[in-house]
Amino acid sequence: METEALERPADLTIWRTLPATSPLAQPERYGTLREAIAAAAGALTDPAKQPWIITEEGEILSPNWIRTYLN
C-alpha cells in the first residue's frame, strides 16, 4: 500500500461474530486510513468483533489484512 493512501479518508465497519442485541454494524468515517487502522486494532482484541475497512479508493481491507499490517 502506498503511503499516500494512509492519509486519505476510510470507513471502518465492525461486524460481530456472535449474536448481539446491538443494532446492525454501521460504518464510521475516519479522516485518515491510519486512524481507521488504529481504531480497528482495538476491535481485534475482541474475538467477537471483525473490523473491515473500505478505503477512499474502494479497496476492502479484511481483518487478516489489518492484523498483518499491524504486525
Image (spheres, grey):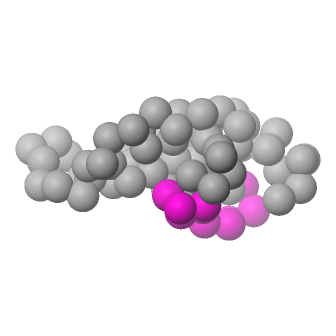
Say above or below: 37 vs 54. Answer: above
Q: Examine the image and state in which quarter residue 30 appears.
A: top right
Q: Which image quarter is the N terminus in?
A: bottom right
Residue 27 locus on image (x, y percent): 45, 48
Residue at 60 percent of width and 61 percent of height: 65
Q: Is residue 54 visible?
A: no
The residue sitting at 24% across, 58% down in the picture is 17
In-image side of 39 versus 9 (left or right): left
In the rendered structure, does residue 6 fall within the stretch colored magenta? no
Residue ID at (9%, 44%): 21
Is 31 placed left or right of 20 in the picture? Answer: right
Q: Where is residue 34 in the image (x, y as percent from the top left)?
A: 71, 37
**Residue furthest toward the bottom?**
59
Q: Going by the picture, which residue comes out furthest to the front? A: 71
Near-viewer residue (25 or 35): 35
Magenta span contains residue 61: yes
| Count of marks, rendered view | 0
* Residue 50 falls left or right of residue 36: left
- Residue 24 higher or lower than 65, as above or below: above
The picture places residue 62, in percent across and down from the top left corner, at 53, 63
Which residue is depicted at the point 60% across and 34% down? 38
Residue in the foreground of this view, choosing between 14 and 69: 69
Magenta region: 56-65
Res 21 seen here? yes
